[in-house]
């Protein structure tokens, strides 16, 4: 008689899988409802006999004749298991089969191995051709407990490479960008002449912007805060039918990184030196940047109209830095000019075109566009705006672009005159709208296939930079703990820095972090491009920070919130004013420093003992002055036996404020009566000394 049975019971009885039983019952036309079936043993045997050429299958039994218990896995067939016993299936997952498999041994590399900075233990194992357990064991020998996914520092990677006899080269994200730049090789037949790129560099207030102002006949310098350029400006002028691109860099000491970027993207470096001021520190730095970039230099001696101008002195000074003018047998072009009087400007442009002609400057305008980000900022109406100098190809509105971590699509372009552009060729400075975040100034920017590719590359670069940052972090040691405990008295001046453009933000942050003192430290807890908003104020309130706004102002809501929260928001337009104020604030935070000044000495000649008040010392002032409120110490054989205060100072029977040298006086010490004749009483006071950072 047929009875209800579950499919799993049938599979267990026959020593097979549930899927196998279901397949046989289905082929035999037997219906299965909710995992149960109404059949007898004979129907099941017929179902198997009808679908199996090998005849009916019998339940598997142990040699002793007893039916063994089998664990059924409903997913066994999906993992590729065929009909077979449970012991076999367990064997596949157990140690038996794994024992037959030989572990794959890493292949030792030949030559120099390139290892990315921030690589994990697993990555290093594969790249060095060393098994992971050996890597972990080697690190344990150095006292480092790591996991297979842990990031290793560059130093650890180099040490491991030395231990295992491998030669490695640590690569970084910046190196990969440099390789991308180097890969851009064009067919000489595709190259066409392009405009020269001139970077104007020099010391602060030597007239760089005024010189460009005179050339472009505009009034840029009048709009600069304090007459000092605060960020890079890129412009184009036409002379004798040829375009020349100028990049104006700041001359202030804080803008070293900007000058370095200007030298990196230029063809010719124009070093401006004031005829009345001579060679200054930033002049030397600009020369070093130009030499490091390997670009030719043109020396512009500006302000020759001033009575104190001395061009020969400047030529002599520059010879100390291996800059020799052509008339002295050197190879450096010297031009004398006056921006104010409009003197020598045509000669300056002629010399620039001459040097550019020698360089035979060409580029491929038909290649995928690439170049460098000169500057970036957040515009309230347009969002992220970046200035790019196109060095190769032609950038067109609609192109997908990526620059480091930032990516996007060119939604709009403008030239340096703020006029709309549809395309920008080589040596053209363009203002781009369309990045999803602020690109870092100096980043290599390029056009890619589509926006999806750009986002992917940007995210990949961001992850790479994150792992590199992890690799640079040092582990906390016991020495660090002791050092932090010792620095418990160190005060922090927390700052939130906001600026109008990325380059100014970078320069200002670097300048602020250079202001240090063993007792007071400057900490920039947050920085960004754009105006001061409510979140900045709330962060400042929570961390007791000062907000520094450089060429930006707080919004109305942020200003109201700052007033209610008592947050100090300061706005500046000139960078050295920021550093001056922060330095002054640090001085105010320093603990007072006191210096001891000896006022005078008195010798004890006679003692008078009074039962009610104690021992009075009759003294003769031998040097200086003894004052009533001064500190007093007792010297016995030049050894200090007491240091304290005076209870009273008298001459005869009257209390006096001081006793001059050569006069007698009576001194009663506060809380000390063990005075002896011959002791010396020394009066002193502590004065606060001005602190400096």
Image (spheres, rainbow, N blue to C red):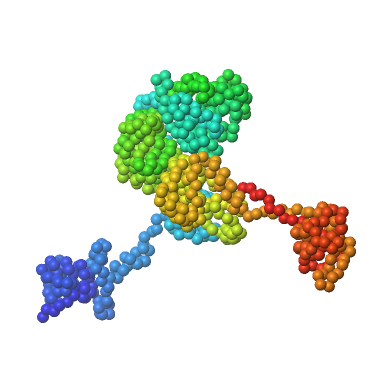
Asked which quadrant contains residue 383, the reply is top left
Residue 625 appearing in the image: yes
Question: Would you identify the image quadrant in which residue 436 lies?
Answer: top left
Toward the viewer: 460 or 667? 667
Q: Nearer the viewer, residue 557 or 64?
A: 557
- Which residue: 30% across, 70% down? 87
Q: Image point 52% across, 52% down: which residue?
A: 494
**Residue at the front extreme, as displayed:** 654
Instruction: Identify the residue shown where x is 49% and y is 27%.
Output: 211
How far from the left and from the top, in percent, is residue 192? Answer: 37, 25
Quarter of the picture containing the N terminus is: bottom left
Q: Position of residue 176 (x, y in %)?
A: 43, 42
| Left-right relation of 170 to 307 | left
Against 600, residue 49 (above or below) is below
Image location (x, y in percent) of residue 421:
33, 32
Residue at the spot 56% in from the left edge and 22% down from the top edge: 305
Residue 331 seen in render: no
Q: How many marks?
A: 0
- x and y, in percent, of residue 427 in the image: 40, 30
């Amino acid at each position: 008689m047929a009875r209800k049975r579950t499919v799993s019971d049938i599979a267990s009885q026959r020593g097979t899988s549930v899927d196998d039983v279901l397949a046989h019952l289905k082929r035999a036309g037997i219906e299965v409802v909710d995992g149960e079936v109404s059949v007898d043993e004979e129907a099941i045997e017929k179902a198997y006999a009808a679908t199996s050429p090998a005849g009916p299958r019998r339940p598997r039994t142990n040699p002793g004749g007893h039916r063994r218990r089998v664990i059924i896995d409903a997913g066994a067939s999906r993992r590729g298991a065929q009909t077979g016993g449970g012991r076999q299936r367990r064997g596949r997952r157990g140690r038996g089969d794994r024992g037959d498999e030989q572990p794959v041994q890493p292949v030792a590399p030949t030559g120099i191995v390139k290892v990315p900075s921030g690589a994990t233990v697993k990555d290093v194992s594969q790249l060095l051709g060393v098994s992971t357990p050996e890597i972990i064991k080697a690190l344990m020998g150095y006292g480092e407990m790591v996991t297979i996914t842990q990031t290793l520092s560059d130093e650890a990677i180099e040490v491991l490479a030395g231990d295992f006899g491998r030669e490695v080269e640590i690569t970084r994200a910046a190196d990969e960008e440099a390789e991308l730049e180097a890969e851009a090789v064009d067919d000489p037949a595709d190259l066409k002449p392009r405009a020269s790129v001139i970077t104007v560099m020099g010391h602060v207030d030597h007239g760089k912007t005024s010189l460009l102002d005179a050339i472009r006949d505009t009034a840029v310098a009048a709009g600069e805060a304090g007459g000092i350029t605060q960020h890079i400006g890129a412009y184009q002028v036409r002379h004798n039918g040829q375009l020349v691109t100028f990049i104006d860099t700041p001359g202030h000491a804080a803008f070293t990184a900007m000058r370095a970027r200007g030298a990196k993207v230029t063809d010719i470096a124009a070093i401006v030196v004031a005829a009345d001021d001579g060679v200054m520190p930033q002049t030397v730095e600009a020369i070093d940047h130009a030499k490091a970039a390997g670009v030719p230099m043109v020396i512009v001696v500006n302000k020759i109209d001033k009575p104190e101008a001395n061009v020969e002195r400047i030529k002599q000074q520059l010879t100390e830095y291996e800059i020799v003018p052509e008339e002295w047998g050197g190879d450096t072009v010297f031009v004398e000019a006056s921006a104010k009087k409009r003197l020598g400007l045509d000669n300056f442009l002629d010399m620039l075109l001459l040097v550019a002609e020698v360089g035979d400057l060409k580029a491929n305008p038909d290649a995928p566009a690439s170049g460098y980000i000169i500057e970036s900022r957040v515009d309230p109406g347009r969002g992220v705006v970046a200035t790019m100098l196109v060095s190769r190809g032609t950038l067109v509105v609609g192109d997908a672009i990526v620059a480091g971590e930032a990516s996007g699509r060119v939604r709009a372009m403008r030239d340096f005159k703020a006029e709309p552009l549809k395309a920008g060729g080589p040596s053209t400075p363009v203002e781009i709208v369309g990045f999803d975040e602020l690109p870092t100034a100096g980043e290599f920017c390029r056009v890619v296939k589509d926006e999806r590719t750009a986002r992917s590359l940007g995210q990949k670069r961001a992850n790479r930079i994150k792992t590199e940052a992890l690799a640079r972090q040092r582990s906390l040691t016991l020495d660090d703990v002791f050092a932090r405990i010792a620095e418990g008295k160190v005060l922090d001046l927390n700052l939130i820095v906001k600026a109008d453009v990325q380059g100014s933000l970078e320069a200002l942050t670097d300048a602020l972090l250079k202001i240090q003192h063993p007792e007071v430290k400057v900490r920039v807890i947050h920085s960004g491009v754009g105006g001061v908003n409510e979140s900045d104020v709330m962060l400042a309130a929570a961390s007791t920070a000062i907000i520094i706004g450089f060429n930006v102002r707080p919004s109305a809501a942020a200003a109201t919130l700052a007033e209610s929260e008592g947050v100090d928001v300061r706005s500046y337009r000139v960078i050295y004013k920021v550093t001056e104020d922060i330095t002054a604030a640090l001085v105010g935070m320093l603990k007072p420093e006191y210096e001891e000044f000896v006022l005078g000495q008195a010798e004890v000649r006679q003692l008078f003992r009074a039962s009610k008040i104690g021992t009075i010392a009759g003294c003769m002032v031998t040097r200086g002055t003894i004052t009533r409120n001064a500190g007093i110490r007792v010297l016995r054989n030049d050894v200090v036996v007491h240091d304290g205060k005076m209870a009273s100072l008298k001459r005869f029977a009257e209390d006096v404020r001081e006793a001059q040298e050569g006069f007698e006086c009576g001194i009663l010490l506060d809380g000390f009566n063990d005075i002896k004749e011959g002791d010396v009483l020394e009066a002193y006071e502590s004065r606060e000394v001005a602190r400096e950072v």
